[in-house]
Amino acid sequence: MRERFPNKTTLSIGDGANDVNMITTAHVGVGISGLEGQQAARSADFVIGQFRFLKPLMFIHGREAYRRNAYLVKYTIYKNVFFVLPQYWFGIYSGFTGQMVYEQWLYQLYNLAVATFPPMWYALFDFEYEKERFLKDPSLFSIGLKNACFGTRIFWQWFFYGAIQAFIVLNLCYYSNEYERYDGETVGLWVSGTLAYSAVVIAVNQKVLMNTHNVDLIQVVCVFGSILTFFFAVFVESNVLFFADLTGVFKQMMIDSNTYFMLLLVIGIFYVTEKLIQHADEALM
């Protein structure tokens, strides 16, 4: 079948040792763990206890695994483009001198702590609909057949979203801090850079929360915990002399009303943007 239809995806299902070759040859192999032994189960990509579990596996978990994994890949591209490109946009203004926008130690926390757990929880536990609906409406399974959740066009769409949002965040946060304080000085590079970082962290976590179909307490804790972790890290670095670049930055940010205005503005802009993106994606699907 694979030779005759090389563009098709094949599935094989078996419960005995004589099915092992079939299971390993297909794109996806499902083994039945039962009276015939464990050979099929050990060779399979997925193992179920009875044949009656095959329908939920294919039409619920298979469909949702495709959708969630596709979203995780798109989101990983998006969040890193959104995070890194402010540095590129800033290079245009700084003559590409190599000056960093983010403090180097804080920079390392992004994929370690502040933009990691919400998409992981989403990719493991999110369901677009109630499970019974998948079994009653087989048309929902068509997103995999149409490759509707991922492709070249979708990749560049999400890249473009991240690039434009990075440009918006950088310009909003930097130009809003150009005013002079009472002592005649501006707030400084690291305050502006940390404010831009704050906006990125809030925006990427906001996006996950808005795309989650069944929001639960753990997802909310992951989102707000990630944001609070970032601000706690800024607080620590601002008060430890080892991190000289950020000394006093947290206090400057927190006493400045511009910080709260800019973060609320970013939340509002990206909320509206995300709603428009969701409607556009639904129309295309």
Image (cartoon, rainbow, N blue to C red):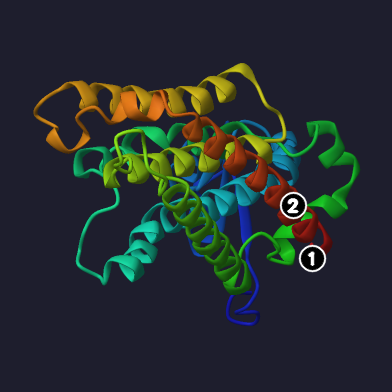
Identify residue for label 1.
Answer: 284
In this picture, is 100 found above or below 237? below
Dot 1: few (<14), some (14–19), or many (≥20) neighbours within 10 Å?
few
61 or 51, which lies in front? 61
Q: Quadrant of the N terminus?
A: bottom right
Q: Residue furthest bottom?
A: 4
What kind of residue is marked 1?
A: Leu
Q: Residue at x 83, y 61 (%)?
A: 283
62 or 35, which lies in front? 62
Q: Position of residue 101 (x, y in %)?
A: 29, 52
Q: Position of residue 90 (x, y in %)?
A: 35, 62
In this picture, is 92 found above or below 120? below
Q: Quadrant of residue 81?
A: bottom left
Residue 278: mark in rendering: 2
Question: Can you tell which of label 2 and label 1 is closer to the viewer?
Answer: 2
Q: Residue furthest left?
A: 242
Left or right: 284 as drawn, with respect to 255: right
What kind of residue is marked 2?
A: Gln
Q: Quadrant of the C terminus?
A: bottom right
In this picture, is 84 found above or below 250? below
User: Is residue 219 shown to the viewer in this render?
Assistant: yes
Q: Secondary structure at mark 2?
A: helix
Q: Residue at x 45, y 47 (%)?
A: 173
Q: Are marks 2 and 1 in contact (CB under 8 Å)?
A: no
